[in-house]
Image (cartoon, grey):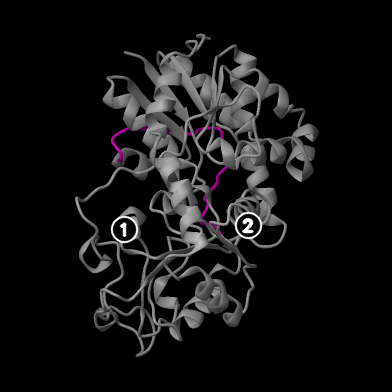
Amino acid sequence: MNSVLFVTWDGGGNVPPALGIAAELSRRGNAVRFLGHPSQRQAIEAAGFAAEAFRHAKPWSVLDARSGMTAPLGYAAVFTDRGIGDDLVASVKRERTDRVIIDGLLIGALDGARRAGIGYTALVHTLYGVMHNTLTRGPLALIARGKRFNPAQLYQAADHILAVTLEELDFGPHDGVDYTGPVLPKPVLPKPVLPEAVLPESVLPEASLPQPAGLGVRGDAHSASTPVVLVSLSTTYIEGQRETLQRILNALSRMPVHAIVTTGPAVDPTGLRAPENAEVHQYVPHDQLMSTASLVITHGGHATTMLALSHDLPLLIMPMNRAFDQPVIGRVIADQNAGLTIDKKATEAEIRGAVERLLPDPSPYRQAAARLGARIRSRNGAVAAADLIETDVPARQV
């Protein structure tokens, strides 16, 4: 049995792949623990793993409101935080550790492990080409160099680079990168259910909410033949996200569809005006909804995009954060003809026009999505990643 340490951060879509791989390693008898921000403890422990909070890292929550340049600078401060590297080394000193898996954006953690002579695997939770370019070019690369980090060397020093995506989407091949395929959530229920019946975190029907008439969510019944459109933008705070969700709701209000919107913790569902053909929830597991959906409107986060494709669903991507992978994933999906990409400030008419192009079945978009979906389902990303981790060079003790 190996003792495995995952070093992560409070970032949204980076966490589920790590938890999925950790679950597979645990199933095989390995002892798994996580090191991350205090705000992650509840989710990590709910998944069945020990959670150790950073002690020297700068305070951070992905839900804190940041606008203008404070947002990218805040993320850069997390990625280049040497305190995370110090906490990693201290954790390895306290507890026997055979494998160390570090989120690929945490330059400070990668550097701390390298300096201490601790072997590590870099976990790339999106397209490797995007992550590598982000770390070696542009503003983040300048900040890293200013703090005397060399991200390219830190990647070269890794025992493994695991990319939980499809190689054909990643402008590859990239030397030294092991592609495991996406790590998808395991189905919780044997059949799809609608959100009214699934989780207490879902917002209650409008009649149960203490709010003015016409504000909040709808829970109206809809015909089984009515196309279901799932709408989900980022779970992190991004300026302007509530306004984009409202324009999407307005656009869909005039269409013969049933919209299901999940806002995540960064947007209050009761702050949205839902039309009669829509319902709004803060959280419902997407894998429970996609089996009934015909289309997904999303921000282009890697995890949501791969999950939608695994259900053969075309995508309308509206990148919310232009600084990282979302615009690139949007272009990739458009290039693959598996969906369309429009600006996050698109008008209601533009949103409606894109949905009208994507909804017909059959369509070239749906066929392309199904082709990629078959490729995703042909691999088990968690199993492939666990295989590589178990054959990795053990972490050198400090």
Q: Which residue is tagged 1? A: 291
Q: Position of residue 171 (x, y in %)?
A: 66, 39
Regarding residue 171, the answer to whether it shows in the image is: yes
Q: Would you place residue 65 above or below residue 128 in this image? A: below
Regarding residue 314, the answer to whether it shows in the image is: no
Contact between labelled residues 1 and 2, with CB atoms less than 8 Å apart: no
The residue stretch that appears in magenta: 47-64
Q: Position of residue 371 (x, y in %)?
A: 47, 48
Q: Which residue is tagged 2? A: 321
Q: Is residue 51 magenta?
A: yes
Looking at the rendered structure, which numbered label has been put on residue 311?
Answer: none
Residue located at (40% from left, 34% from top):
379
Q: Is residue 165 magenta?
A: no
Q: Position of residue 23 (x, y in %)?
A: 32, 32
Residue located at (36% from left, 82% from top):
277
Q: Amino acid at mark 2?
A: Asn
Instruction: Tell me the element at label 2.
Output: loop
Q: Would you place residue 334 above or below residue 381 in this image? A: below
Q: Nearer the viewer, mark 2 or mark 1?
A: 1
Magenta stretch prevailing secondary structure: loop
- The count of marks equals 2
Residue located at (45% from left, 28% from top):
6
Q: Amino acid at mark 1?
A: Ser
Q: Position of residue 262 (x, y in %)?
A: 40, 65
Report which quarter residue 30 is drawn in.
top left
Report which quarter residue 240 is drawn in.
bottom right
